[in-house]
Amino acid sequence: MDDSTPPRRPFGVTLLLWMVLCLSAWGLLRFTAALRWWDLLLEKDSRISPLYLSITGAGWVVAGIVLIWGILSIRRWAYRVVPISVFLWLVEYWIERIFFQESRANLAFSIALSIVVIVITLVSAWNRSSKIYLTKSEEHEQPEKHSTSP
């Protein structure tokens, strides 16, 4: 194997990448749905404004693009930012669920799923191979200090 090739991406990093892709897709759906159904949401006096829905949806799309780029280009900050982003998404979900949605019977399922998402995110991010890949892999992009090549 050539020294200039980046190391193979571990499964945990791939899993984090898929989680970010899912959150980005959710944000895009939220954004487009808010724009598409704007008038209906206003007409039916929705508890959450279409402006809020569109801004948060667009925000998650932008955050997702940045996070995907960070993971694919093996940026050191992705190691910490991805779990923080997933946690913030869950906080947003629970704030909306508690304060703006009608009560639903699937509370236990939502709690269990939130815990599973947190555990998968933390295990994937804190996994030794993921941590090494995301925090030390930038070395392959750095020129050698004692290299004679320009």
Image (cartoon, rainbow, N blue to C red):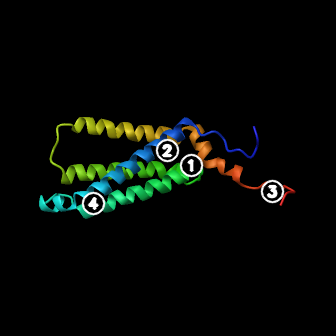
Q: Tell me the CA gap for discs 3 and 4.
A: 52 Å
Q: Residue at x 49, y 39 (%)?
A: 15
Q: Nearer the viewer, residue 89 or 68?
A: 68
Q: Amino acid at mark 4?
A: Leu
Q: Residue 36: give x, y in percent of width and height.
A: 25, 58
From the image, tell me which residue sits under label 4: 35
Q: Amino acid at mark 2?
A: Leu
- For label 2, the SS is helix
- For label 3, the SS is loop
Q: Tell me the CA gap for discs 3 and 1.
A: 25 Å
From the image, tell me which residue sits under label 1: 72
Q: Mark 3 or 4 closer to N-term?
A: 4
From the image, tell me which residue sits under label 3: 145
3 or 1: mark nearer the eye: 1
Q: Mark 1 or 4 closer to N-term?
A: 4
Q: Mark 3 or 1 closer to N-term?
A: 1
Mark 2 Cα within 10 Å, few/some/many (few <14, many 20+)? many
Q: Contact (CB < 8 A) between labels 1 and 4?
A: no
Q: Residue at x 17, y 37 (%)?
A: 105
Q: Contact (CB < 8 A) between labels 2 and 1?
A: yes
From the image, tell me which residue sits under label 2: 17
Q: Residue at x 45, y 41 (%)?
A: 121
